Image: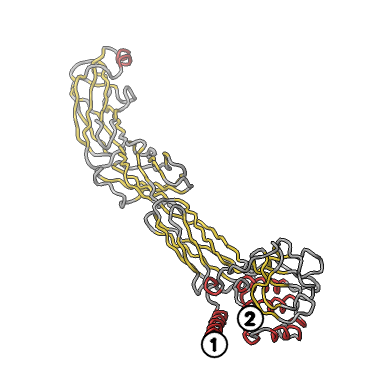
Amino acid sequence: MSDNTSVRGRRTALALALVVGVSPLLVVPTVAAGPTVRGADRPERWAGYEIPPDGSADGGWIGGYLVDGKPVFVTTPTKDPNRRGYRSARVVGDLGGRRGPTHGETERVAWILSKYGGYRDAAQAAAVDVSVYDLLVGGRWGTSGDRGERRITEAQDPGIVRRFARIMLDQSRRHAGEYRARLTATGTDVGGTVAAVVTVTDGHGHPAPGLPVTLSATGAEAIQAVTGDDGRAVARFSQSHAGWQRVTATVRQVPEHRLRLRMPVRQGEAAAAEGGARRTIVARTRAAVRGPQTLALRASPATVSAGSPARVTATVAGDGMARDATGTLHGPFPSASAAQCDGAALGAGSATVSVDGDYTLPSQVPGAPGYYIWEVAVDGTPTALPVRGCGAVTTVKAVPTVSLNAQNPEMQAGNAEVRIGLSGLPRYPAVGVTLSVLGPYSSQQQLSATGCSGAIATSIGQTMNGDATVTLYPYVDQAGWYALQATVAPAELREGAQSTCLALGTVLHVS
């Protein structure tokens, strides 16, 4: 009495498991060891019920057989019973034909065999047998056909067998087909975590719960998980290195959508299909892990004249992928210490950078003297963080032009009248201009030969503003020929300048 109660309780629990679709790891354990097989490929009864024989493969036994240590279920009930054994299994995805089962029915049979055909229970094995006949043969061998109904009735527990078969057929209709796994992985920065999510769906696109999954990522320890009710399994991997990291999901114990068919050794005897066969799905993707780039700036050259091109050289190190680097010139500022990258921008230009190295970015042309500073921004990539630098101060010097004109080039000893013009400098601050009178020379030819390298007879200094004109009156008391030259000394933000030697209006003749 207690034994019968135990069996009924076990079968009730199994029926509940079939209805709610519990994890295959719990519902469908690994095939139990069967009796010793006397012929390596000959069938032995494995799990099921003895029924009256009728001379065909569907008689004498309702359930599964054991061949080479694997459970098999007859697929051709009208053939002779198999006594000579089976050939090696071959994978068949479609038994379809004008008279055969459809592709969908083949997948349903494969799913039932895979899901429930490896569990050694008499009632369940009998239900698998009945379901296989219903889908592959149908007609009289359907669950409601005369031969199918008679076989169920002849089983020891017909009510349980009939109920199990109904559940299997219903579930196969909803879930059979090729299971698929889709893997996604989020990107992160070095020091962060990559979240890997694998989603497994059944043959109808529904979530497939209860499947064991191994998730792994480059340089990280593999994580074991089980798909949840939503068909998903999630793992997180800490990342310490930049680059593309390979992420893999290996899903095991996946129900088959193909039959492992075993043809008979002797023609005319029954064929069979293996139960409990599972497959493994591997899904792969890559996760981008961003690391820092390095950036150094150098003005090239550090000092330029106003109106000349200013350039910056960026030394870039990153992941080697092509990306844009943009250089922006800010200024002018009154001092180098005051230069900063949130000031007014003169202009910007971009260039493509890739491998580590030096890159000279497009030039900018500052027109006003002062101190300028470069800001360079290098774009990020999937595996490199963007980087920005501010520096490479460039000094821009004004280029003054000084001119002079003697108002009385032929004169007697006394005060000469010389007009001096200054341009190319801002009006403020004022700068010092020196007028030199070189000579005397005995003749104009001697003056021309010596140029402006002779002795200075007299000189006058004058402070004046840029873009202005002044008149100076140097005193000359000796007769002869004189050269006049005006000079502006160089400074931090300007270049030096001299008037043109011996130009028209720069020679004085005193008689």
Q: Residue at x 72, y 83 (%)?
A: 151
Tag 1: amino acid: Met
Q: Badge 1: how crowded within 10 Å, few (<14), some, or many (20+)?
A: few
Q: Residue 447: x and y, percent?
A: 30, 15
Q: Quadrant of the N terminus?
A: bottom right
Classify mark 2: residues with Cα within 10 Å, few (<14), some (14-19) or many (20+).
Answer: few
In the image, 296: left or right of 12? left
N-terminal of the pair, mark 1 or mark 2, is: 1
Of labels 1 and 2, the one closer to you: 1
Q: CA distance from mark 1 to mark 2?
A: 33 Å
Specify the quadrant of the image occupied by residue 430. top left
Mark 2 residue type: Asp
Instruction: Give how far across and how far down residue 45 sits, in percent.
Output: 67, 72
Is 55 rendered above or below residue 446?
below
Residue nearest the viewer, comparing 459 with 204: 204
Q: Residue 1: which disc?
A: 1
The one nearer the camera, 49 or 484, is 49
Look at the picture and state if 152 lies above or below 260: below
Q: Which residue is mark 2?
A: 170
Q: Looking at the image, can residue 511 be seen?
A: no
Q: Quadrant of the C terminus?
A: top left
User: Which sits in the foreground, 336 or 72?
Assistant: 72
Residue 247 in the figure: left or right of residue 163: left
In the rendered structure, are the residues bearing label 1 and label 2 in contact, judged by CB atoms less than 8 Å apart?
no
For image coordinates 32% across by 51% down, the residue present is 344
Q: Is residue 81 left or right of residue 309?
A: right
Query: In the depicted view, which residue is nearer to us: 348 or 315?
Result: 315
